[in-house]
Image: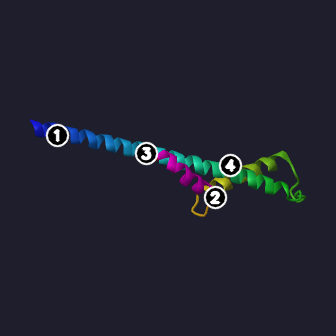
C-alpha cells in the first residue's frame, strides 16, 4: 500500500512538472511572437520615415491608391524581415532580455 502512495505522488509530480513545462513553452512562444511584432512595427515606422525622404515619383504620379499600396508593401516587408533569419535583431534582443523575467 505504501508503494501505491509513493507511485501516486511521483505521478502527480510528473504531471505537475509536465503542465508547468507546457505553460512555460506557451509563454515563450507568445513572447517570441510579441517581440517579432514589435520589431515589425519598428521596421514599418522606419520604412515609412525613409520613404518620406525620397523625392516624389513623377512617373506614376502621386495618388491615394499608390500611397495605400506603398503602405501595404512596407507592412509586408517589415513583417517578412522581422520573422526571417536575417532580421534586424531587435526582436531577438527583446526576447532574450524579457525571457529572463519568465523564468522567475
Image depth: mark 4 or mark 3 in front: 3
Question: Which residue in the protein does label 4 denote?
Answer: 41
The residue segment tinted magenta is: 89-102
User: Where is residue 76 shown, x and y percent of the image?
Assistant: 67, 53
Tag 2 or tag 1, which sits nearer the N-term? 1
Image depth: mark 4 or mark 1 in front: 1
Q: Please tell me in which quadrant of the rendered image residue 89 appears.
A: bottom right
Is 14 on the left-hand or right-hand side of 31? left
Circles 3 and 1, Cβ within 8 Å, touching? The answer is no
Tag 1 or tag 4, which sits nearer the N-term? 1
Is 48 on the left-hand or right-hand side of 94? right
Tag 4 or tag 2, which sits nearer the N-term? 4
Q: Please tell me in which quadrant of the rendered image residue 87 appears.
A: bottom right
Tag 2 or tag 3, which sits nearer the N-term? 3
Tell me if residue 93 is in the magenta stretch: yes
**Which element is circle 3 on?**
helix
Q: Quadrant of the N terminus?
A: top left
Question: Which residue in the protein does label 1 denote?
Answer: 6
Q: Please tell me in which quadrant of the rendered image residue 17 appears.
A: top left
User: What is the C-alpha distance between the residues marked 3 and 1?
Assistant: 27 Å
Question: Which residue in the protein does label 3 denote?
Answer: 24
User: Where is residue 47 shown, x and y percent of the image?
Assistant: 75, 55
Amino acid at each position: 500500500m505504501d508503494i501505491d502512495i509513493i507511485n501516486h505522488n511521483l505521478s502527480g509530480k510528473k504531471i505537475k512538472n509536465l503542465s508547468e513545462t507546457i505553460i512555460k513553452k506557451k509563454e515563450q512562444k507568445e513572447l517570441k511572437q510579441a517581440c517579432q511584432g514589435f520589431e515589425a512595427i519598428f521596421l514599418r515606422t522606419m520604412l515609412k520615415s525613409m520613404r518620406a525622404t525620397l523625392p516624389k515619383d513623377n512617373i506614376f504620379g502621386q495618388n491615394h491608391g499608390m500611397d495605400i499600396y506603398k503602405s501595404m508593401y512596407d507592412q509586408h516587408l517589415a513583417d517578412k524581415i522581422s520573422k526571417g533569419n536575417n532580421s534586424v535583431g531587435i526582436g531577438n534582443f527583446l526576447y532574450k532580455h524579457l525571457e529572463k523575467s519568465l523564468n522567475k
